[in-house]
Amino acid sequence: MLDKSFYEIFVNQAPNALAMFDKQMRYIAVSQMWMEDYKLVGQDIIGKTHYEVFPEIGEDWKKIHQTCLTGEINRCDEGLFLRADGTTQWITWDVRPWYDSDDTIGGLLMYTQDITKRKKSEEKLNLITQRLLLATKGSKLGIWDQDIPNDVLVWDDEMFRLYGISQDSFAGNFNSWIKLVHPEDRPLIQRRAENTMFRGEDFEVEFRVILPDKSIRFIRALAILQRDENGNPTRLVGTNVDITTQKEFEEVLRRVASLEAKSKEMEQLAYIVSHDLREPLLSIKGLVELLLIENKEQLTEEGKTFLDYIKQATLRMENLVNDLLDYSQLSKIKELKEVDCGKVIEMVCADLNSSIQSNNAKIIATDLPIIQGYPLEIQLLFQNLISNAIKFRKEALNPEIRIMSKKIRGGWEFELKDNGIGIHEKDQEKIFILFQKLHGKTKYEGTGIGLAHVKKIVELHNGQITVESEVNKGTIFRFTILTDSVYVENR
């Protein structure tokens, strides 16, 4: 065996943390790295025992030392060293005996490496990994990894959940995945993958997958391509996320936009039609009146009757055109304002004064609220309901109309109750349909737009309207105005 002096030179010149001890664990020689790793630079430790220099060394370490002094070797790839000052060091070690020239054990050689920085980096990486796992689970993000040369595709648990399959049913290659994609979207994915690998384009694609229950989900995939030193594609690492809800919402927005466009077109059409119809109607009306005035003596009674029919039909058509124009204007964007419903009823009663007086109608409205609404539309709403209640009165009974309200979440609920002829149960669903009339035009005048108008106004205020009625026992209309939150948001 080599003599002690060789060991001392070897230890002193070693580029690593190395120490040489005698059988009493006294320092014979140490490397500079040992002094630096254990913050001993400037101290004279030669001749001191290892336990004097490190009083924090416990019995477990001492047993290792004693065992090695009998000829054994002890190694550890990772151990925690608790220092006396409260700090910690992660180290690896190799402890073994050294031998004198007569092959007797002269002491120990101890090689260590401070891996504290590496451990802290690993802990940080582990923490980041755990956070990433939590983030991916929370966001329902699936992660996949494809070995391109060997065609091996690895999925995490979330990927299997997204595709609705088990790990046992997945072969773990590109072909087994593409079979799950909607047939119409497979060519798109193939093109994107080729463009990524051969043209360097980003891999970002949206496609549909068919789940085992035949339902269809929308997926967005993103991936990063890795290449070898020769530029050949080696690996794709990517994510999948279910965007079905987003796509459904986008479809709703598209439909709303389409409906808004159609609504504007219909408004314009209704305006043009009503405007263009009004002029010939006025001409027909004027000609009929002219014929009745200038040819009154020459006309037979039958001719006068026919002209009167034309005049009445023209008047009904004119009313219909006006009502249609009013109905079409409801879709226009307006501004919510405070509306005093009590004052609205007063204005409506003033406008309907002639009808109220001639039919001895009684309007009872108490403690009506101030609401958030569109003033003109609210007035038209009450005007239509009140005039409707007067129109469909019982012949032997004076009309009585009661209007009540109560506060509800988001707005107000109103109730308008009359003592009129009522509505048959089978007809109650029809009354809010445009141009729907339940009675002949000879008995009750009207265009069949009034209650459709009412329903549209209520819906314009985010509410709903219902009817409760029984033939010959009157009718109750209940409707809600739910604009409180909308008004607050827009202020």
Image (cartoon, helix red, strand yellow):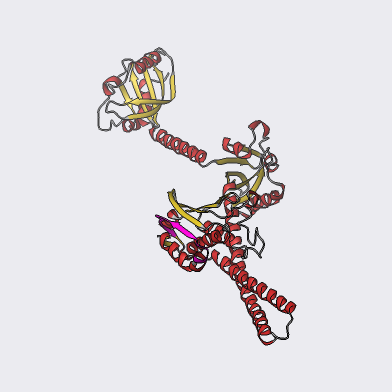
Residue 366 magenta-highlighted: yes
Residue closest to the far front: 396
The reply to whether residue 394 is in sight is: yes
Question: Residue 373: where, in percent of width, then height?
Answer: 45, 60
Image quadrant in which the C terminus is located: bottom left
As drawn, is 397 to the left or to the right of 56?
right
Q: Quadrant of residue 311?
A: bottom right
Q: Nearer the viewer, residue 464 or 266?
A: 464
What residue is drawn where x is 74% and y is 79%? 303
Question: Residue 58: where, in percent of width, then height?
Answer: 32, 18
Question: Residue 455: where, in percent of width, then height?
Answer: 56, 57
Q: Is 322 placed above or below 139 here? A: below
As drawn, is 22 to the left or to the right of 478?
left
Image quadrant in which the N terminus is located: top left
Q: Quadrant of residue 296?
A: bottom right
Q: Nearer the viewer, residue 210 or 435?
A: 435
What is the total number of numbered labels drawn onto the structure image?
Answer: 0
Q: Nearer the viewer, residue 302 or 42?
A: 302
Q: Nearer the viewer, residue 103 or 183?
A: 183
Residue 414 magenta-highlighted: no
The reply to whether residue 411 is in sight is: no
Residue closest to the far left: 43
As drawn, is 412 to the left or to the right of 169?
left
What residue is drawn where x is 51% and y is 60%? 386
> Where are the magenta residues, as a range?
357-372
Question: Residue 357: where, in percent of width, then height?
Answer: 49, 66
